[in-house]
Amino acid sequence: ITLTPIRAKSKKISDLLVGAFFEDINYAADGGLYAELVQNRDFEYHPADKKYRDKNWNHQTAWRPGLGTLAIDSVSPVHPNNPHYAVLSYDLGKPVLVNEGFGGIAVKAGEKYDCSAFVRIPSAKAGQLTWRLSDKNGNILGTASMKIPAGTNWKKLSAVITANATVADASLELIFEQQGSIHLDMVSLFPQKTFKNRKNGLRADLAQALADMKPKFLRFPGGCVAHGDGIANIYRWKTTIGPLEARKPMRNMWNYHQTTGLGYYEYFQFCEDMGAEPLPVLAAGVPCQNSSDGGAGQQCGIPMADMDEYVQDILDLIEWANGDAKTTHWGRLRAASGHPKSFNLKYIGIGNEDLITDIFEERFTMIFNAIKKKYPEIKVVGTSGPFYEGTDYVEGWGIARKLGVDMIDEHYYVPPGWFIHNQDYYDKYDRNGSKVYLGEYASHLPGRPNNLETALSEALHLNNLERNGDVVAMSSYAPLFAKEGFTQWNPDLIYFTNTEVKLTPGYYVQHLYGNTPGDEYIPADLQYSGNDAGVIKRISTSIVKNTKTNELIIRAVNLLPVTTHIRLNLDDFSGNSKVQKTILTGNPADRKAKPLTSEIQLQANTPEILPPYSLTVWRIRL
Ligand code: AHR
């Protein structure tokens, strides 16, 4: 095949095309990206968190008394949003409380860990609490000690443990150094080494893997987590900021527990640290597919009488993110949390895959109009509703057109063949209407692997998104993270354990496109010397230019089982001697394929080789 760029037909495309989708699914937050090592630190795990499984899930989950007894109480708690705490007692000696972390606590030799807890001794006497990390054989990996002053009020105490060995599955023991009772809450063991060394920060290796993708934006906190399964389960940003003990933990609709330690402040901070635009997505006043709280199948939304308050919450978010640190109420609160500068929020998502019913439309319209009235500069991303293969997004797009919504969020999880046979999907979209945010997509095969075949079909789709980068403004693969052994959804982009990060072929595709973004699309003439239409459908190319770095990026996906030769007709571009070439190739079922990068010289009359099942990216400095 021969590829000839047609420079005269170049067009501007979105410079935010490849971003990331973060949802607390598969233990992506607690036990994952959020670096806290103690599980159930707030003793707020509740049987209702796990609606469908694990009957033993309760306030004591992940804890056990090493010596003495453990009870849970809620009289005079640390904060009403965090009503339960542990009562550890032993009349015959020193009581000990043990936490097993999220399937073990991983520590590294020489690294420091911040210990903190709210503590009180009902007897009002002074006392001492020893923190001890130990391995499975009882070897002590580090200790710290806290003096507890006399008095029956809660006190927040802290200390530091330095680990003396690297262990994947340590446990934490808290030893009350006298007989009797002690009350404990918000028991935390937090690595000092976090991404960008932020306090209450993110697990450095996981955050780095995401940052390495160079996502142009980060969507959070979901997915379905954003709108919850029932009105009471809607994610409310205001209860996820401020002191940790005052945040409101909640049931995660993926059947576990969210501490909200990773809350809106941390999400915005992470975006800034990665250089990604923040894209918070809030419920459109309706829970997941307008589900009823009782699960009776009735559709429901926040009662209209409460909607003014809900709309105000959304306006307050914009003020919290962008408002002046001295003259606005919410800006002041942001500053008090440590960020006087504006977070420069530009986009806000309203709704996630909701059924487009009257209940939805009424609430969405209210929210949309209120945002546009007060903050016309904020771009609102609406939702297209659930995807039904073979249909159009008539309903979601209807209201978008009526209101002039800036962007519409589409979601689809489809087989590789769908991507191959729908390459013109966005070519048909109206260029004068709302833009598209492809907020969730992934290629699904039976058994749901993330392998080379799925990854290449996603690459092929990304080429088609680039060609349509004048109407498709943003895209993000979903879901992002999955903790092995704690996973509700496959495939995901990044698998991990407590000590390892396991990147997938799909990750490498997102990484490659994220690291070679263009802001100009250059159409090309693709000549194929054969006459089998099926063949040419399995070859996909895209040429973009990055006008900031002055680079030309050429991509070619070969989904054929055979080598293909491609002649790159680049006469029109000068100075193309130094070329960085990256190839991702292997067996279609390969889950471990990794790209290889080399410096090459493009030869004028020698075709380049596209290996069977491959993605090749040439990065040419102009
Ligand atoms: O990405 C996983 C889930 O898929 C999201 O939470 C939801 O929006 C979609 O149905």
Image: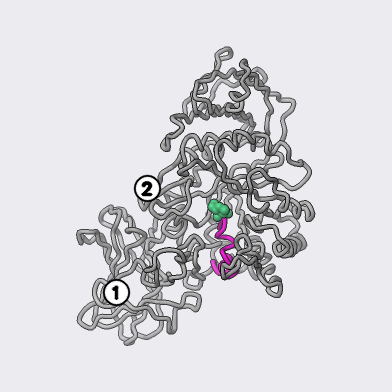
What's the residue at 57%, 51% (across, down)? Answer: 218
Task: Tell me: residue 326, above or below residue 479.
Answer: below
Q: How is the image coloured?
A: one colour
Residue at 54% across, 24% down: 579
Q: Which residues are magenta?
A: 221-241
Residue type of the residue flagged with mark 1 = Leu
Q: Quadrant of residue 197?
A: bottom left
Residue in the image at 65% along x and 56% along y: 349
Residue 375 in picture, x, y percent from top left: 73, 60
Closer to the N terminus: mark 1 or mark 2?
A: 1
341 displayed left or right of 486: right
Give the position of the C terminus as an image quadrant: top right
> Is residue 178 left or right of 215 when viewed as pictured?
left
Determine which of the numbered discs, if any, sits on residue 4 in the image: none
| Residue 513 falls within the magenta-colored stretch | no
Give the SS element for disc 2: loop
Quadrant containing the N terminus in the rendered view: top right
What distance separates the C-alpha of mark 1 from that of mark 2? 32 Å
Q: Residue 405: give x, y in percent of width and height.
A: 74, 53
Q: Which residue is mark 1?
A: 129
Q: Which mark is residue 500?
A: 2
Give the residue at the far bottom of this rendering. Answer: 123
Q: Amino acid at mark 2?
A: Glu
Number of marks in picture: 2
Q: Position of residue 542 (x, y in %)?
A: 62, 30
Furthest-front residue in this view: 296
Q: Secondary structure at mark 1?
A: strand
Q: Nearer the viewer, mark 1 or mark 2?
A: 2
Bin the neighbour count of mark 1 within 10 Å (Cα to Cα): few under 14, some 14-19, many 20 and up. some
Res 220 seen here: no
Task: Please give left or right for residue 15 compared with residue 34 in the image.
Answer: right
